Image: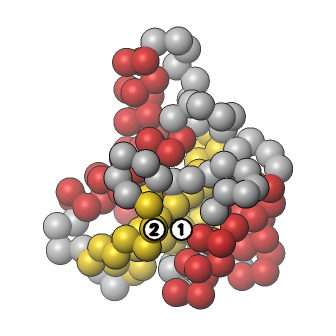
Amino acid sequence: MKQVIALSGVAKKGKSQTIISVYELLVAKYRDAKVEHLAGSLGADVKVLITINGITIGIESQGDPLPGRLPKSLADFVKIGCEIIVCATRSYGATVEAVEKLKNAHGYDVITFEQQDAGKSKSAQQSANQKMAEAIVAEVEKSLQ
């Protein structure tokens, strides 16, 4: 089953960092995973492929609207044959439409997580982001079994 796990939310709430944490958690847990960086670098945004148990996962942390790279990354992940795609999107607009296109054109199931706003406390937001990353990893792991 092909699926997109999209982390949706407004700007500046830590979606990119949450997606990077998903990547870091998967690599730490699955030490035998094959990892290929396609663009970006840690500390900024990542575009990476991780293959675990023969299942290819595409991860794109940049979910900014046009001219963001999400539509191209999604097209690349489809062309590569990713069974699972994890990405960030805004709450509406071009990035959400790009994910919907995968559903309609390529048969991906879409699971959307809503980024939590933990208020003005930086540490509270980081904690919320980490919990969200763990929830997304748990969803990815359902498809790895």
- Asked if one can make out residue 143 in the rendered structure from this viewpoint, the answer is no
Mark 1 touches mark 2? (CB < 8 Å):
no
Image quarter where the C terminus lies is bottom left
Type of amino acid under label 1: Ile
Type of amino acid under label 2: Ala
Above or below, 112 relative to 13: below
Residue drawn at the location 40% of the way across and 35% of the way down: 131
Name the residue carrying label 1: 85
Name the residue carrying label 2: 39
Indicate the position of residue 10 as horizontal and vertical percent values.
68, 34
Category of crowding for the residue at label 1, using alpha-carbon neighbours closer than 10 angstroms: few (below 14), some (14–19), many (at least 20)? many
Category of crowding for the residue at label 2, using alpha-carbon neighbours closer than 10 angstroms: few (below 14), some (14–19), many (at least 20)? few
Distance of label 1 from label 2 (alpha carbons) = 15 Å
Q: Secondary structure at mark 1?
A: strand
Residue drawn at the location 65% of the way across and 72% of the way down: 72
Q: Nearer the viewer, residue 93 or 135?
A: 93
Indicate the position of residue 7 as horizontal and vertical percent values.
59, 48
